[in-house]
Amino acid sequence: MLSRLLPVLLGLSLSALLAFVPAAPSPIKVYLIGDSTMSIKQIKAYPETGWGMPFAAFFNETVTLDNRAQNGRSTKTFLTENRWQPVAAALHEGDYVFIQFGHNDEVPTKGSYTPEADFTANLKRFVSETRSHKGQPVLLTPVARRKFDEAGKIEETHAAYAELVRTVARETNTPLIDLDRTSQALLQQFGPETSKLLFNHLAPGEHPNYPDGREDNTHFSELGARRMAELVLADIRALKLGLADRVVQGTVKKTVDPQAR
């Protein structure tokens, strides 16, 4: 009798135990929309690297990163070129949209120029349409350019448009990653000379893609992209976004001394 009951009892015990095992999190997508500082680079542009490239490696198998950022784009051109609409249409509940613009919106001489009122309206559209599809928007201020004054102090290069992003975040109650401020602090930590390592600075003949060399204070080296991605990750954790629970265990939690390289 006992021998016949034992399998039944074991089965019931196993069922009871499984009832307390939490369900695996559902797969989600994280969309990145923005400009060249975030985008995936073509081989011909290497070693220039968008921070969205190393960012993809921070998450476990439940997260798919879909980087839609493109060189030269603004909030205006992301809409006029029909780049935003497919993202909105593809969103599922729980997906994230990281929204980082400003570099190209703020330059009046570019075709991508977006007046401040339009920039604000476009950001609010991205936020509201993300939420209407049950997605989770996250706003980011534009990442800093490398520009120091004669005293070696980092200079603000996105003052007006970064503040517009902050205002939209407050007005729409949207999580804000203030990459403008945190990246400025990182560049100040590195200083005027060492900070060149974070950007696409190359001597003539150093890389076949840039035989005449390169002094680019906007776009990142592989090291710079990684460090910017780490800043974004740190704020994901500080904001206690649900996405933080999907970070690969052991992923860096703090920045490293700029002299330790």
Image: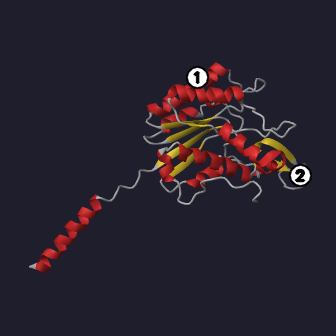
- In terms of secondary structure, where does tag 1 sit? helix
**Residue type at mark 1?**
Ala
Identify residue for label 1.
121
Count the marks.
2
> How dense is the environment of label 2, judged by Cα within 10 Å: few (below 14), some, or many (20 and up)?
few
Q: Residue at x 78, y 34 (%)?
A: 155
Residue 134 at x, y percent in the picture: 43, 36
Residue 17 at x, y percent in the picture: 27, 63
Q: Residue at x 54, y 37 (%)?
A: 138
Q: Residue furthest left?
A: 1
Q: Residue furthest front?
A: 151
Q: Mark number for residue 149?
A: none
Can I make out residue 167 in this image?
Answer: yes
Q: For this rendering, which residue is in front, 41 or 10?
A: 10
Residue 209 at x, y percent in the picture: 83, 51
Q: For this rendering, which residue is in front, 76 or 186?
A: 186
- In terms of secondary structure, where does tag 2 sit? loop
Identify residue for label 2.
203
Does label 2 or label 1 sit earlier along the sequence?
1
Q: For this rendering, which residue is in front, 118 or 72?
A: 118
Picture quadrant of residue 120: top right
**Residue type at mark 2?**
Ala
Q: For this rendering, which residue is in front, 59 or 184?
A: 184
Q: Residue at x 90, y 48 (%)?
A: 212
> How dense is the environment of label 1, judged by Cα within 10 Å: few (below 14), some, or many (20 and up)?
some
6 left or right of 242 in image:
left
Quadrant housing the N terminus: bottom left
Please determine whether, in this image, residue 214 is positioned above or below residue 260: above
Separation (CA) of disc 2 from disc 1: 42 Å
Quadrant housing the C terminus: bottom right
